[in-house]
Amino acid sequence: MSYGSPSIGPSSPPVIELRALCRQYPATPPVLALRDVDLTVRRGDHLAVVGPSGSGKSTLLAVLGLLDRPTSGSYALDGVETAGLGDGERTALRGQRIGFVFQAFHLLPHRSARENVELAEIHGGGAGRRGRSRRALAALEQVGLAHRSDFLPSRLSGGERQRVAVARALMGAPALLLCDEPTGNLDSANTEALLDLFDDLRDQGVTLLIITHDDAVSRRAMRRVRIADGVLTEERGAEVGA
Amino acid sequence: MSPPATRLRVKRYDPRDLLTEALVGILTRPLRAALTTLGTVLGITTLVITLGVAATAADQITTRFDAMTATTVSVSAPPPHPGSTDLPLLDWDGPDQVRPLAGVTAAAALAEAPVGHDLPVRASAVADPTLAGASIPVVAATAGLPAAVRGTVTAGRFFDAGMVARHDRVAVLGDQAAALLGIGDLSQAPAVFIAGQPFTVIGILGGISGEQFLAATVILPPTTAHDRFAFGTPGRVLITTALGAAGQVAAQAPTALAPGRSTELTVVAPPSLERARKGVAGDTNALFLVLGLVSLVVGAVGIANVTLVTVVERTGEIGLRRALGAARRHIAYQFLLESTGVGLVGGVIGASLGVIGVVSVSAAHRWTPVLDARLALAAPVAGALVGLAAGVYPALRAARREPVEALRSGL
């Protein structure tokens, strides 16, 4: 699995580019979940979005993951402007460029770790059936779980399950790993192990965007963005509002 | 940097992957899948049994109609009371009396050996211990017997009226009797010894389709049998009729044979067509067909219901698949294939049970089971179609689930 040779910094190409992005939910009065959000995430970035519940984190995740459409503004993912895309194109883009990691792992309970990882290629990515199981094993290797490839999720620990989910997200070398509270169901030891894994991945050039409310998680990130009442603020550096 | 937009096509759901995913989807909940198939199984079973029994019974009508029983009438006289002075009810000229009746194609009179007469039959005058157990009855019959029982003389000839008139000491063997006695070649004019008296075997009668017992008998001319073994008057007159004439002949024959005392005769005639049809109608009742269709509908509703529950349960899985890049239609295909699979399994089981049912019903009625092979093949297809139809609504519901809300619930 190759992510090219990342040149991290302001010069590397943007993976996420949000410009004046708004998401409004119809209600009386209308709820503005995201207000004029500007954000640039470059290749190889490790970015944490922190904020209390109800701050708009979930909405941001849904928009970034192409699971929801913004009301206004522009969102370019890996150089592709998503505003004018149809449902099918958004689905294809999601399947090819984004790897998801969820708080509740979302592993199919009756499938082995390897089969769960293979699921990513069944629906997304460009590869066919040939060599799929080899690629799945490689992804499990990457998260240090090759020896558990035939285990059912029920026989894995929480930390191991989340690493299987990460392996699944890594299938097809996505441009972006989108993690929604990845440590929410883990104890501190497993959280630490997962964050070490994220560091490794970042070193390999994987772009990480982690949505969390856990300070321990966000402290390990390169960049930290705070969201409150739908407004994004970069905590250090000057990436926001470019 | 930006890849061409034409590459943004949803990945094709490889049919093999789709099949695997659907199969696993069914098999991970085996008990539920089994219970879900039950309705389809019942429906298909009922349909196959109803249609199969109908076909079997319909064929039964034609078989009965075609069969020799439909054209055979047998008139028998009760054995005379000892010491009775009444004239016998049947006489050897009985066949001549019924032959003028419309519809009669052949007739013969038949007498069995008088009670109390033991007539051992041997192929040679020397007692052969190996044949000790074989007991071959002796009967007397008129010259028209081969036609009356639809037999064919496989070797030699049957005795004719002249031989009967001359009281010739000739015998015709039923084919089984000939085999028992070891007589096959008639060129040497072999003899059989009945109670020690020799008779020349002039023919072998085979292929008897009515009165099967005659195949294992020695048949003598009535005159000869009367002379030698005190055979009396015939006990039965066998009549072969034209197709459809059996009922009428059965009504007229007793009068022709024994005018004035016809009621004392017993007539065995084939069951009338109306009665056969009535018996069949009970089995092919349209009610069963309706019942089968109703259970099929119930089966479909069951599949739809369970699939709907499954869709709700698997909300998280749907969300995950969508997040991984599955299009809405892929989700729909998968649920559709799962419900179709459940219906197909129900159809296969139902068809099997139905075939077993048809065979059982046939066995109970001593019928030949008749089943259109296309019915046995169409039944599983019907089950699959039921599953397909039942899956449409749940599949659409599944496809319409928004991935965001779907992901909020766990797996």
Image (tube, coloured by chain):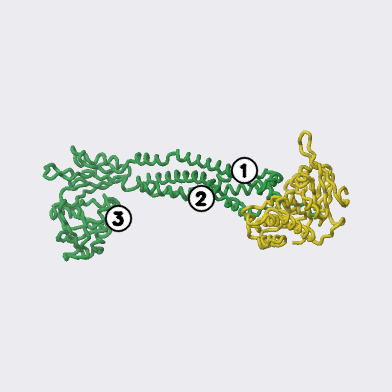
Chain colours: A yellow, B green
Q: Nearer the viewer, mark 1 or mark 3?
A: 1
- For disc 1, the marked residue is B394
Q: Are marks 1 and 2 on the same chain?
A: yes
Q: Quadrant of residue A2?
A: bottom right
First in sequence, mark 1 or 3: give its number: 3
> Which amino acid, mark 1?
Pro
The kind of residue on which mark 2 rests is Val
Q: Is residue B112 left or right of residue A57?
A: left
Whether the residues at callouts 1 and 2 have beta carbons within 8 Å, the answer is: no
* Residue A233 spot, x, y in % from top left: 85, 47
Mark 2 vs 3, N-terminal side: 3
| Residue wearing tag 3 | B207
How far apart, in angstroms, are the residues tagged by discs 2 and 3? 43 Å
Q: Residue A126 appears at what percent x and percent y?
A: 72, 56
Checking the image for residue B348, the label placed there is 2
Q: Chain of mark 2?
A: B
Mark sitting earlier along the chain (1/2): 2
